[in-house]
Structures are given as C-alpha cells and as structure tokens.
Image (cartoon, rainbow, N blue to C red):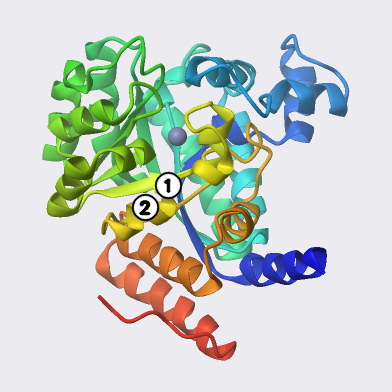
C-alpha cells in the first residue's frame, strides 16, 4: 500500500512543473559524460561507469560540509574546456526538464574552471550555450548564478563579480558565495565583490548555515541578500526567523544535502514545518543531482512522506519558488500561469495568492 501511494506521489510530483533555485553544475555531472571526458581529456579517474558513479556520488553521511565538498574535485578537474562545460550544462538541464523542472537557476564557480586557460567570460558563455541548447530541446527556462568561492581571495571574487555583471546578456541574474564555511566564515571579507554585483544589477544570494549554526545565517544578512542558500538552522532561533520575515529573505532549502553534510541529525529533523509556521519563505531544491544522487521529484516525495507535508503544501512551496525566482515580471507571470493551468487541468487547487 505504502509503495503504491509513493508511486502515485512520485508520478504527480514528477509531472508538476517545478522551479529549482538551488542547483550546482559541478555537483551534477552525469557519470557517463564524466567517463567520456576523463578518457578524452586524459584526466586520472575511474574508467568504468560504476567506478565513476561511486567517485561522483558523495557518501550518504559525510563527516561535515568540508567532507561533502571533496566530491566536487573530480567534476571540476573534468570541466576545464568550453565543450565540456557546454555538454555538462545541457545534459544536466535536459535531465531536469525530464524530471518536470520548468525553471532552473543553475549556479557554479566560474573561477574554478579557468585552469586550462578559459577566461571567466568564456566559462560563463559555455555554460550559457549548454543552457540554451537544453531550452531549445525541452522548453526549460534557465537563469545563471555566478558563485564566488570562500577560499578564493577578495580580488578573485571581485573579478568574478565584474565578469558576472558583464555577462547579464548571457543570462546571469545573481551573485552567490559558497565553499568551506568553517575556514572562511565571514562573508564581509568579500563585501567589495557583493557591492560590484549589486551595483551592476545582479541579485544577491549566498550559502550560509552549513556550519556554525544560526549565527552564520544571521551573519549572512550583513551582505543584504534577497535569498540564502540553505540557512535551515535559522529554525533554532525565533528572533532570527522574525528578522528573515521582516527582511523578506527567502531560504533555498536542500534537505537531503543537509542530511548528507551532517547538518541535521536525520531527514525527520529537517525543520521545514517550523520555518513555515514562523512565516519564513522557503523553496525546495536538491543542491546536487549527482553528488546527492537525487532528483527534485524525489526530494518532493521525501518531504511528503518523511516530513508529512500534504501535496497542497508542496504545491504552495513550488509556487513560492516561482515567486522568489530571480526573474523579470513577464517571465515569472508566464511560468506561474503555466503552473496554475497545470493545477487546474488536474483539479488541484492553486493556493490563495499572497
Ligand atoms: Zn549549494
């Protein structure tokens, strides 16, 4: 019985046109493509599919965030030329479209892909052209987020912000910060880069609370983000939740990834219900298709089954994703009307407009 119900949920939630706002390119490298790239680029890596898959998928339970991040080293080594970046982007976004993702914000750290001579602009252009190919083939709408890296120096991240602003014509809409939070806890180290990005018209987001608890989420507010990647630990701090609500900051949550990085004890402890009951705006995402071996539909099903949210609540969460997306009003309205039409065709109620 349980299995049948899970199948029904999975069918419905796979078909639902979902937004995904927190998704990393390098954490989502298809193992078959990785095999081909390793062979053709002469990169030292497993030579069979099972071995490659084992190398790209992180353990279900890592020691901490830094341990999880080790899974990114091989994909970054494989993605150092324009063709590789184009194909990784196209392959991922086609897989997302097949999983019912109608809108994706794809993020990655362009400065990690310049080891063989690509400029930041060339890295961004290659990922953008892969995204365009996926859009042409499937209709998926895509925007790009340039991610600065905490372990890079301030000048490198500032140069990325400048390149990202100059690449708004390629679909870059936002500037992000990610990486080892324990080693570089203070985002104000990069306030210059954030200022360049903001003044250049990019939305601001950053990763926070993968280490260091609610204090790190509070610290993230110092760079005035529109959204925070993760930040679930804010649920432990009622005053912080109130501040997130007052500032209208959205949390782009990834429950499975947080379980994997040992940020929460188990999936059942993930505080979606607590955050929502305090009025905090949240979206639901995977973080990484391959590192976490997880589709967005599967994450929705986990929230349904392991956290007990109703399908109606998952519909509200998906709708919140479109509302929080870094999109122009016209595209947002088009995607939302497609979403509402899909609901209406299935006689599922759209949540009341806020
Ligand atoms: Zn992330």
The residue to which callout 2 is attached is: 274
Residue at image coords 29%, 72%: 330
Using the numbered discs, state the Cα–Cα distance from disc 2 to disc 1 in whole angstroms.
5 Å
User: Residue 218, located in which quarter of the rendered image?
Assistant: top left
Q: Is residue 52 left or right of residue 229?
A: right
The image shows residue 104, relative to residue 191, as above or below, that is below
Q: Nearer the viewer, residue 210 or 101?
A: 210
Q: Are marks 2 and 1 in contact (CB under 8 Å)?
A: yes
Callout 2: 10 Å neighbours few (<14), some, many (20+)?
some
Residue at image coords 36%, 64%: 320
Secondary structure at badge 2 equals helix
User: Is residue 326 visible in this depiction of the protein?
Assistant: yes
Q: Position of residue 334 (x, y in %)?
A: 38, 75
User: Residue 337, located in which quarter of the rendered image?
Assistant: bottom left
The residue to which callout 1 is attached is: 271
Q: Nearer the viewer, residue 156 or 277?
A: 277
């Amino acid at each position: 019985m349980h299995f049948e119900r899970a199948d029904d949920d999975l069918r419905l939630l796979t078909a639902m046109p979902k937004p995904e706002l927190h998704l990393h390119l390098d954490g989502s490298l298809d193992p078959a493509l990785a095999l081909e790239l390793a062979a053709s680029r002469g990169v030292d890596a497993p030579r069979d599919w099972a071995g490659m898959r084992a190398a790209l998928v992180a353990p279900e339970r890592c020691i901490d965030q830094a341990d999880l991040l080790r899974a990114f080293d091989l994909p970054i080594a494989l993605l150092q030329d324009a063709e590789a970046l184009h194909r990784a982007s196209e392959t991922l976004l086609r897989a997302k479209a097949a999983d019912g993702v109608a809108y994706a914000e794809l993020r990655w750290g362009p400065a990690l892909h310049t080891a063989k001579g690509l400029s930041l602009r060339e890295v961004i252009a290659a990922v953008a052209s892969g995204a365009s190919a996926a859009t042409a083939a499937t209709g998926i709408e895509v925007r790009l987020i340039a991610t600065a890296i905490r372990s890079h120096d301030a000048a490198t991240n500032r140069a990325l912000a400048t390149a990202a602003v100059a690449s708004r014509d390629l679909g870059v809409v936002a500037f992000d910060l990610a990486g080892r939070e324990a080693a570089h806890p203070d985002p104000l180290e990069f306030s210059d880069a954030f200022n360049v990005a903001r003044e250049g018209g990019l939305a601001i987001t950053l990763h926070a609370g993968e280490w260091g608890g609610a204090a790190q989420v509070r610290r993230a507010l110092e760079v005035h983000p529109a959204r925070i990647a993760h930040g679930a630990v804010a649920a432990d701090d009622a005053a912080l939740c109130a501040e997130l609500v007052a500032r209208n900051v959205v949390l782009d949550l990834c429950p499975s990834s947080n379980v994997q990085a040992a940020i929460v004890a188990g999936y059942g402890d993930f505080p979606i219900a607590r955050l929502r009951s305090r009025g905090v705006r949240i979206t639901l995402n995977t973080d990484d298709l391959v590192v976490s071996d997880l589709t967005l539909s599967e994450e929705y099903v986990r929230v349904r089954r392991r956290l007990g949210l109703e399908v109606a609540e998952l519909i509200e969460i998906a709708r919140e994703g479109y509302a929080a997306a870094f999109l122009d009003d016209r595209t947002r309205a088009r995607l939302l009307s497609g979403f509402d039409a899909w609901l209406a065709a299935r006689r599922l109620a759209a949540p009341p407009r806020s």
